[in-house]
Image: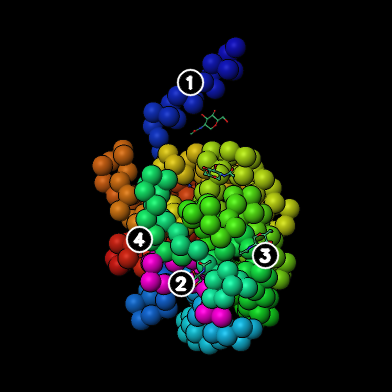
C-alpha cells in the first residue's frame, strides 16, 4: 500500500513538473531534399547534420529497359562524400503531379498495362477522386519484376556505400475497379518489394515508408500487424514521410506500430517534409518547434534518424 502510494505520488509529481525528457544521443539529424543542389550542399556543412536523403524517380534511373543510368546518384554521392557526410536514397515509384509519370517509358505498353495508374492524394479522395499524380502498379507482377531488377542493379552499385535506401510511402488511392487493382495484391506486392530490397541490400539499410494502407485503417484486416511482422522477419527498416506529433490519423495507424517494433527491425526513421512544417501544435497554436518534433520522434516513436526538409527554419539559424 505504502509503496504503491509513493509510486503514485511520484508519478503525479512528475506529471505536474513535466521536465524536458532526455533526447537520445543516438538520434541523427539528416536533410531531406528532392535534389542535391547548392542549398542542400551548403546545409551539409552544418556540424549537426549527418547526411542527406535524396529522391530519385524510377523513370530517371532506367531510361530504357535494363539500361540503367545512375550517373546522377553517383555525382550526388561523390559531392556528399567529399563533405564527409552520409548518403541515403529514396526511390520514388509515385508522383504528386498529374503531368509526371514515375515509371520508365518502355512500360507504356499493354504488356505492363502502362506500368502506372492515376492516383489521388489527400483526405478527400474517397468522396472526390481527383487525379493528383501517378503510382507504379506494384500489384502487377510484371511491374514488380522490373522494379526488383532495378533494386538489384542499385544494390550492385551502392550497397555498403550508401547508409540506406527507402521505398516510398505505402499510402495510395487509385481507382479500385481499374488496372486489375486489389487491396490484397497491392499489400502483398508492397511487402514483396520491401523484402526484396532488404535481401539485395545486405550492408545498407532497406527501409519501407509505411504510413497508411488502403484497407488498413487502424489495423483493419490486420494490415499493420502483418506488415510490421513481415518487416521484422525480413530485416526491413520502417519509417514514414510525416512527423506530426500527436496527429490523430497517424496515431491510429503507423504511430502505434513504429514504437512497438523499433527494436525488432533494423532501423526506424521519420521525415519532416515541407507540409509537416505547416502543421499546428494544438497545445501552443503554433507550428511545432524543433524541440517538439525531436521530443516526439525520440520519446514516442523511438526513431534513430529524422530527415528534415531543407526549408526547416532551424536549419537556417546558427
Ligand atoms: C495506356 O496508354 C495509352 C496511351 O497513352 C492509352 O491509350 C491506353 O488507354 C492506356 N491503357 C491503360 C490500360 O490505361
Ligand atoms: C489481370 O489479372 C488476370 C488474372 O490474374 C490476368 O490474367 C490478366 O492478364 C491481368 N490483366 C492485366 C491488364 O494486368
Ligand atoms: C479495398 O479498400 C477500400 C478502402 O478501404 C474499400 O472501400 C474496398 O471495399 C476494398 N475492396 C475490397 C475488395 O475489399
Ligand atoms: C482502433 O480499433 C480499436 C479496436 O480494434 C478501438 O478500440 C480503437 O478505439 C480504435 N482507435 C481509433 C483511433 O480509431
Residue under circle 3? 141
Residue annotated with mark 1: 9
In front: 181, or 163? 181
- Does label 2 or label 4 sit earlier along the sequence? 2
Residue 117 part of the magenta-drawn span: no
Q: Main secondary structure of the magenta part?
A: loop
Q: Nearer the viewer, mark 1 or mark 4?
A: 4
Observer-nearest of 80 and 227: 227
* Residue depicted at 30% across the width and 53% down the height: 278
The magenta region covers 89-107
Residue at the disc numbered 2: 101
Front: mark 2 or 1: 2
Disc 3 element: helix
Question: Circle 4 sits in a helix, a strand or a loop, which is it?
Answer: helix
Find residue 274 and name its label. 4
Q: Are the residues flagged by discs 4 and 3 in contact, CB closer than 8 Å?
A: no
* Mark 4 or mark 3: whose residue is earlier in sequence: 3
Q: Is residue 82 above or below residue 13?
A: below
The residue at the far left in this view is 285
- Give the x, y percent position of residue 37: 38, 80
Q: Are marks 2 and 1 in contact (CB under 8 Å)?
A: no
The response on whether ligand 4 sits within 8 Å of label 4 is: no
Amino acid at each position: 500500500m505504502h509503496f504503491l502510494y509513493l509510486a503514485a505520488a511520484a508519478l503525479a509529481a512528475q506529471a505536474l513538473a513535466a521536465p524536458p525528457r532526455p533526447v537520445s544521443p543516438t538520434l541523427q539529424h539528416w536533410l531531406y531534399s528532392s535534389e542535391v543542389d547548392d542549398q542542400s550542399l551548403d546545409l551539409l556543412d552544418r556540424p549537426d547534420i549527418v547526411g542527406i536523403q535524396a529522391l530519385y524517380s524510377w523513370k530517371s534511373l532506367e531510361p530504357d529497359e535494363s539500361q540503367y543510368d545512375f550517373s546522377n546518384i553517383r555525382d550526388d554521392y561523390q559531392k556528399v562524400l567529399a563533405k564527409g557526410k552520409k548518403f541515403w536514397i529514396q526511390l520514388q515509384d509515385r508522383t504528386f503531379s498529374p503531368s509526371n509519370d514515375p515509371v520508365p517509358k518502355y512500360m507504356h505498353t499493354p504488356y505492363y498495362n502502362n506500368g502506372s495508374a492515376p492516383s489521388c492524394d489527400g483526405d478527400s479522395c474517397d468522396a472526390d477522386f481527383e487525379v493528383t499524380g501517378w503510382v507504379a502498379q506494384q500489384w502487377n507482377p510484371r511491374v514488380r519484376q522490373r522494379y526488383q531488377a532495378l533494386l538489384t542493379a542499385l544494390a550492385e552499385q551502392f550497397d555498403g556505400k550508401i547508409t540506406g535506401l527507402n521505398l516510398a510511402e505505402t499510402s495510395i488511392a487509385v481507382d479500385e475497379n481499374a488496372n486489375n487493382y486489389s487491396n490484397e495484391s497491392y499489400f502483398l506486392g508492397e511487402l514483396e518489394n520491401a523484402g526484396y530490397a532488404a535481401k539485395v541490400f545486405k550492408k545498407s539499410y532497406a527501409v519501407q515508408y509505411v504510413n497508411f494502407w488502403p484497407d488498413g485503417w487502424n489495423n483493419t484486416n490486420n494490415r499493420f500487424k502483418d506488415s510490421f511482422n513481415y518487416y521484422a522477419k525480413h530485416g526491413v527498416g520502417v519509417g514514414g514521410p510525416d512527423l506530426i506529433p500527436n496527429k490523430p490519423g497517424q496515431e491510429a495507424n503507423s504511430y502505434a506500430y513504429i514504437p512497438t517494433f523499433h527494436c525488432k527491425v533494423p532501423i526506424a526513421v521519420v521525415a519532416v517534409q515541407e507540409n509537416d512544417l505547416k502543421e499546428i501544435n494544438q497545445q501552443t497554436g503554433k507550428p511545432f518547434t524543433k524541440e517538439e518534433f525531436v521530443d516526439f520522434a525520440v520519446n514516442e516513436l523511438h526513431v534513430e534518424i529524422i530527415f528534415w526538409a531543407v526549408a526547416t527554419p532551424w536549419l537556417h539559424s546558427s
